[in-house]
Amino acid sequence: MKAKWKYFLLAFLCTGLVQCGKKAEDEVASKVDIVMPNKSPLVRVTPRNLGTTEISDNWFDSVFMVRNNSGKDVRIEEVMFYVTIDGVETGPHIFDLGVLTLYDEDGGSPYIFMDYCTYPKNMAGAVKMAACSNGTADPEAGVPYSFPLTFYIGRLPKPQIPSLLAFPVRVEFHGVVLDGAGGDADRFFKTINFTTR
């Protein structure tokens, strides 16, 4: 009987530790607001060319704004979209922001995603990417700037009722909470939901 109580007490303590760790992570995420300027993006039914890339039919785009009121610096590293069509959740459509790092001709990376995907405490801005003013990664050729990153989600299955393009969407933002020295201190996770039209 004593052994059962010991196992129960051990399990209870482990649960408490897991919950404490989760609360610290949730506390930061609860104070970081991520919103969409366009709360219900339109689904386009025909493909479209964007530069050298074609966005397949049944697609939508979205931009997100971040306001960090947490008192800690956070960095967003991955964005995942889950789209529900005819009651079935599809995805994830994954965007790894780390691949947006720009390299110069010498193999250096003057603009890495950690510089422009980090949101210091009390900062507001778009989920963004960076480039020089002339569109290259050459720091001698122009002043770097950042601009909002548009996410394109395409190749969505056609719904059973083609005119019904109102898809519920769940978006997960994954990243890290930074310590005072800029190192990874904890995970960052935030979910938002919206519906297309």
Image: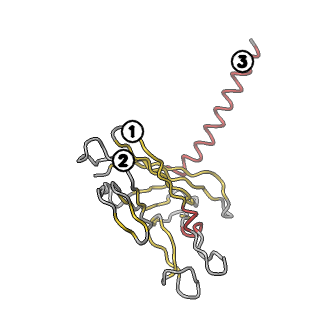
In this orientation, does residue 31 appear? no
Q: Is residue 50 above or below residue 46?
A: below
Q: Earlier in the sequence, mark 2 or mark 3?
A: 3
Quarter location, residue 105: bottom right
Residue 118 seen:
yes
**Residue 5 bears which disc, if any?**
3
Amino acid under disc 3 = Trp
How dense is the environment of label 3, judged by Cα within 10 Å: few (below 14), some, or many (20 and up)? few
Observer-side mark, 2 or 3, equals 2
Decide: marks 1, 2 in contact (CB < 8 A)? no
Residues at marks 2 and 3, CA–CA distance in whole angstroms = 53 Å
Q: Secondary structure at mark 3?
A: helix
Mark pair 1, 2: CA separation: 11 Å
Q: Return the residue found at the far top.
A: 1
* Mark 1 element type: strand
- Which residue lies under the disc numbered 2? 157
Dot 1 crowding, Cα within 10 Å, few <14, some 14–19, many 20+: few
Placement of 195 over or under 182, stated as above or below: above
Task: Please identify the residue farthest to the bottom as the structure is shown.
Answer: 141
Q: CA distance from mark 1 to mark 3?
A: 44 Å
Q: Circle 1 sits on which residue? A: 88
Rendering coords of residue 76 (x, y %): 54, 59
Query: Residue type at mark 1?
Result: Val
Q: Position of residue 42 (x, y in %)?
A: 29, 57
Label located before the other in sequence (1 or 2):
1
